[in-house]
Image (tube, grey):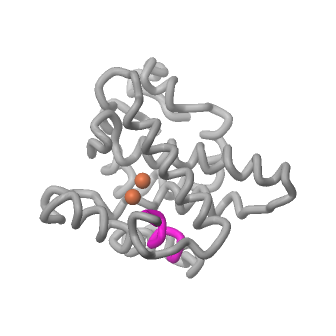
Amino acid sequence: MIKMRDGSLDNSLKKIIDEESFKRIERHGRDILDSKEFKRSLGQVHHHKTTVGLHSIRTAMIGLWIIDRLKKSGIKVDERKVVRITLLHDLGMLGRKKRYKNDFECGYMHPRNSADTARKIWKDIDIVSIKAIKSHMWPLSLNVPTSKEAFVLCLADKLASYKDITFKGEEALKGEQIRL
Ligand SMILES: [Fe+2]
Ligand SMILES: [Fe+2]
């Protein structure tokens, strides 16, 4: 379970984390959560009020919420794939201040960089997942999602970003404050 270092569930974290969804995220993506890149992502502020890591966990939770609804309509989406690509989709922007000249370059380049980082963590990642990560900025980029999983990532990322920006919590939670 995701908790604060002292074992508590801080109020800001409670607003973000749903325990049942987090269990599903752990089941499919424990190795990603344990990677040095993901741990680092919990220390990089993102969307002012969160971190790349917490944004990615929130994207995964919203992704699960979307696929549960699609399932009720008879549309099956690969749950494991959705969890893994949502956790990985922004890891390419680690160290963004040194890596990119400006926000525009970051927005344009980070999906490709995230695909490269994903290959390092998930050695036998399939082409559908790589393409999904590369297309997650659509329609802000011209790289169009071409699978159900890619559409779910794209939508979940937009909803998570909206929630991040409108989040009424305390300061961004940093990696050293959190135990995954
Ligand atoms: Fe992104
Ligand atoms: Fe994102």
The answer to whether 115 appears left or right of 77 in the picture is: left
The x, y position of residue 118, in whole percent, is 44, 69
Between 173 and 69, the one nearer to me in the picture = 69
Residue pictured at 71% horizontal, 63% vertical: 78
> Magenta segment: does it hold 171?
no
70 versus 58 height, above or below: below
Residue pictured at 47% horizontal, 64% vertical: 136
36 versus 17 height, above or below: below
- Where, quadrant-wise, is the N terminus in this rendering? top right
Between 66 and 4, the one nearer to me in the picture = 66
Residue pictured at 75% horizontal, 47% vertical: 68
The x, y position of residue 32, in whole percent, is 49, 57
Residue pictured at 47% horizontal, 19% vertical: 8
The x, y position of residue 48, in whole percent, is 28, 37
Magenta stretch in the rendered image: 130-138
- The residue most toward the bottom is 127
The answer to whether 118 appears left or right of 94 in the picture is: right
Between 28 and 131, the one nearer to me in the picture = 131
The x, y position of residue 57, in whole percent, is 50, 45
Between 147 and 22, the one nearer to me in the picture = 147
